[in-house]
Image (cartoon, grey):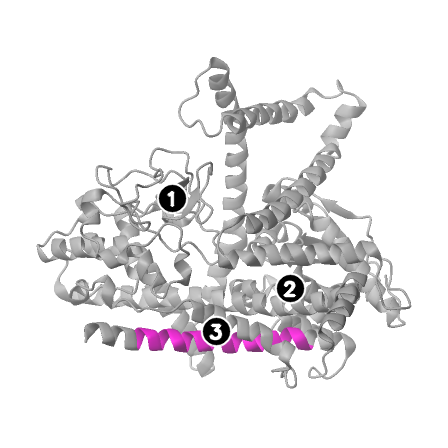
Amino acid sequence: MSITCPHCGATNPDDANFCSRCGTDLRTESAQRPPSSSESGADRSIAPEQAEQIPPEQGRGAGEQPWLRPDFLGDDDIPFEAEDLALGEAVDDGVSDATDIPVVAGRLVSGVQGLLEPIRVATMPGETAGEPSVVLPAAPDAALSIERLRRVRALMGEEPLLASARGQTLRSRAALWVPWIFLVMALAVAAPFLGIGMRNTGTARAWPGVGSAFAAINHLSAASAVQILWAYDPATAGEMDVVAAPVMRHLLDKGVRPTIYSLLPAGPATARRLISAVQDQELQRGGGLGQAALEDVQFLPGGVMVLPAIAQEPATLALVFGAQPEDVQAWLEQVAPRNGAPVVAITAAGADPTLRPYLDSGQLVGLVSGFDGAATYTALLDQRDPTAQDEGMKLQLAGQNLAILAIIGLIVIGNFAALFGGRRNDG
Amino acid sequence: MANLAGQIDWVTAFSAWTGFVVALLIFSAIFGDHWLARLGQSVLVGSALGYAAVITWHALGRLPFVLQLRADPMSNGWNWIPIVLAALLVLSALERIFMQGEAGPPRAGWQHVARWLGLLPAALLVGAGVAIVLFGMVQGTLLPQFLRAAQIGLHANLPIEVLLTGILALVITASALVFYAVDPDRHLADQPGWVQRFMRGWIWVGQRSVWLAAGAIFARLVVSRTSLLIAQFAYFRLILASTGLWQSIEAWWHSMTGM
């Protein structure tokens, strides 16, 4: 027994309360019950009268894994074809407002990490255009009307706004064999273990902000009051530990006893673990580090609302160890304007583009991000040649280089698929 | 900790193998949604939530006003207000949790009361949160970024790359805003042809700009995650090879295959 999500069409167990793919609340009447044997899996969510408009070859079985099929991207937009046909005719007839054309619920981009809220893009026959989604979306798109969302979806689906292109049907959409993506990424992951790409990992890129971050921490003394916001937990510690370790080592080397706050329950434990690991490493190297104030690591429940209370404490320097740009932004918005302490951000590579403007505007005095930032900071700290990296950093940089090559390869493959796939269909 | 033979203690070995197995369970989701992948997800999510719940409970018990209440419950009546509001919210949440799956208006009178009472603390929470965030956004992001942008001017002494970057940023930002704000069907239907073409061109540029921005961020994310995955495999290879179980498996394999 299974239940079909009305938003993305995914099959869920009968007792599921939320869709496992897009998170839509299934505890409503619009959720489809198990289909009859005559229905195909992909068109369960559409009205029977509209199923006739869909080419038979687009229907698929319920139990298949759609992402393994060669035309996966095409199957996702089965309703789009019906919508396109209807819209194309409506536009040709001079109808500018397509909200009264019954279209089928489809899937908007579900997010890079699957974290965006599902948005009801289109309406089922009989529904009003303004009916809100059963799950209140948190994204800014919530303010858009259904018609606006439909247009955004059409635009995101590579359909140009020129009238001549409106007649495009689903068959002209590029077909990319999704296993190519898995194959290329698997090769990129396996390559370092075969020795490929490990010999010459190149030099880590010295992004702006690393040098100033180093200088800001270097000017500290043992008496300096340093505040740290520890905004990552074990979920993101894989990358963040690599970036945070040299910075923490520098802090401990200066004899600083920082006050560490965390808004995440697992943040203090993550902080203590990293600090202990850094101290153990230094002991193994024969060096010694000042004892950090491991007992002064506080978890503050309440989220962003608790940050203004931290601003009442004076500080010489503030550091934000955060995997997400929102953590750094929250500190810059809630604390920094109040206590005036300069802020250094230590963050993941994905957050770097969002935080660059804050560095340019002077709100951040330093920015250390990603493996490149970690390698550059380590080279500054150890006063050594940036190309001389330890094995761990070499592996990270090699993996990064291979992943970049893999993405370039996928872009090339995708463009070839679009180029030749479109020509083949038109021919 | 490793002994002289290079093996690690049983606690570390058990943790390493458990982590490896759970990682494989999660990876198996690539091949479809099945009970093994769900088991891995449940273990991870359940343990994280359980730990978070315990830590949060302990942290709540150390709040200043809670410590005051524990020392002297009648010292300050205002300290009871957060407790009462929290209790109302918890009651309302429990009612919804236990009534989940039965969507629709509440049936019993107490359910009505519980849901209504929960609205007040929820409103306070949301209202205060929104106010703090909005005020912070203005003072911490909008104002400083606007002032910074206003300082940048067009003059002959600007390096060419700075000038080009600034112009590009202006064009991309404006076109992305137009893309999100203008609906050609509604806003341009009555406009002259040249206005429609001009605006559609902006929208076209804005659409591609949004794609590029999203793609660049996604690509960097994929790159860092792939690198982490490689490092994780390397870690597993290193740590598991130090365990007695791995060495036993290796010895068995040698005996079976003769290699």
Residue B38 visible, this orientation:
yes
- Chain letter for mark 2, please: A
Instruction: Give the x, y percent position of residue A273.
Output: 77, 56
Instruction: Give the x, y percent position of residue A57.
Output: 25, 59
Magenta segment boundaries in residue numbering: A394-419
Instruction: Give the x, y percent position of residue A299.
Output: 71, 44
Report the residue marked by disc 3.
A407
Quadrant location of the C terminus of chain B?
Answer: bottom right
Report the residue marked by disc 1.
A5
Which is closer to the viewer, label 1 or label 3? 1
Quadrant position of residue A126: top left
- Labels 2 and 1: the sequence-earlier one: 1
Confirm whether circles 1 and 3 share one chain: yes
Residue at 33% over, 74% down: A417
Q: Which mark is residue A239?
A: 2
Which is closer to the viewer, label 2 or label 1? 1
Q: Is residue A417 magenta?
A: yes
Front one among A394 and A10: A10
- Labels 1 and 3: the sequence-earlier one: 1
| Kind of residue indicated by mark 1 | Cys
